Amino acid sequence: MKQQPGVKTAYMLAVLNAAIIGFSFLFTKMALEFSGPLDTLAFRFAGSFIVMSVPVACGWVKLSYRGKPLYKVLLLAAMYPLGFFTLQVFGLQHATSAEGGILYSFTPVVTLIIASLFLKEATSFLQKLSIFLSVFGVVFIFIMKGSSIDLSNMAGILMLFLTCVAFAGYTVLARSLAKQFTPSEISYLMMAVGFIVFFGISLISHTADRTLGDLFTPLKSATFTLAILYLGVISSLLTTWTSNYILSKIEASRMSVFTNLSTLVSIAAGALFLGEEVTLYHWIGSALIIAGVLGANMFGRGQTGKAMEITEPAQRGSVHNG
């Protein structure tokens, strides 16, 4: 069966996204040494929005929102970045990062369920099995490290689980919006909403506490500025644009399973830059994750072509409208 143009590129970008997200944990730790979670998010999306505004203002990136359902993109932005990062920040105040990692690994499963309900995406038994295998690989690594879920942290656990729902909802809705918007149009609105809301809340908070002068103090640090540039430009802007492109080419359930590859990258980053030990269970868990990702995208190819037929007219429409 003939593949839609750009599918191979979409898979390569999905792997790149996982690598970028894997390193983002390292840069987030760096940024949080100089600034609080809310201020870090404010600068992160300020950087994203400002950088993308340059090619838009220069006319290098063409945007056209006339006659398009903007409320759907605003709903998308409410899920990600607003819902996802807000729930993550407050969830991690009541739960551990290990619990966050375990729960985040279930994102592909939640995406599979939502995509089947709202997009009518069909997956074979082997695809479902592969998705669960990749989730088990992540959970296996965390359990072997001695991590577990403490049910006494129920408020934090619930919020961290809702980050899965928020990201899965974004993945599914972005897939459907590919019929009406280009990846750049979706990404720019998402970054704008993230910037306005997070920076607005940060300004109001500092003004109320009479600490407005402290807001920009972290920017004096080259380390913080570097971390923000990575988080804002690469980890937010670039991955958002590529995710929207990927979702215009492949199913939401296939893309979501790539998120678990970020665990492999975070392990490698910890070993290379923080001197963390890589043990046998890391290798076993990594093999399970990779096998799950490959299986989810190799099995059931007969259904892929059918799903792609839906998006081809959408892409032509997006170019025409732009």
Image (tube, rainbow, N blue to C red):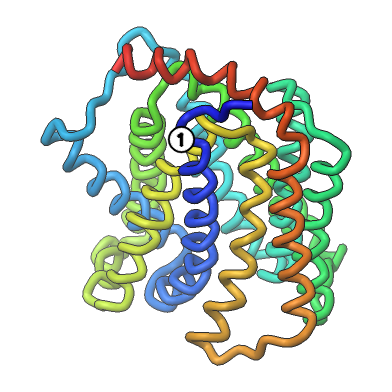
Q: Position of residue 4 (x, y in %)?
A: 52, 27
Which residue is located at x 34 percent, y 37 percent? 192
- Residue 299 sits in which quadrant? top right
Can you see residue 208?
A: no
Is 221 on the left-hand or right-hand side of 151? Answer: left
Instruction: Kindly identify which residue carries mark 1.
Output: 6
Which residue is located at x 17 percent, y 42 percent? 54
Which residue is located at x 54 percent, y 55 percent? 15
- Quadrant where the N terminus sits is top right
Which residue occupies the extreme left position in the image? 58
- Quadrant where the C terminus sits is top left
Q: Position of residue 284 (x, y in %)?
A: 79, 75
Q: Position of residue 228 (x, y in %)?
A: 34, 64
- Mark 1 crowdedness (10 Å alpha carbons): few <14, some 14-19, many ≥20: some
73 w.r.t. 232: above or below:
above
**SS assignment at label 1:** loop
User: In front: 85, or 274?
Assistant: 274
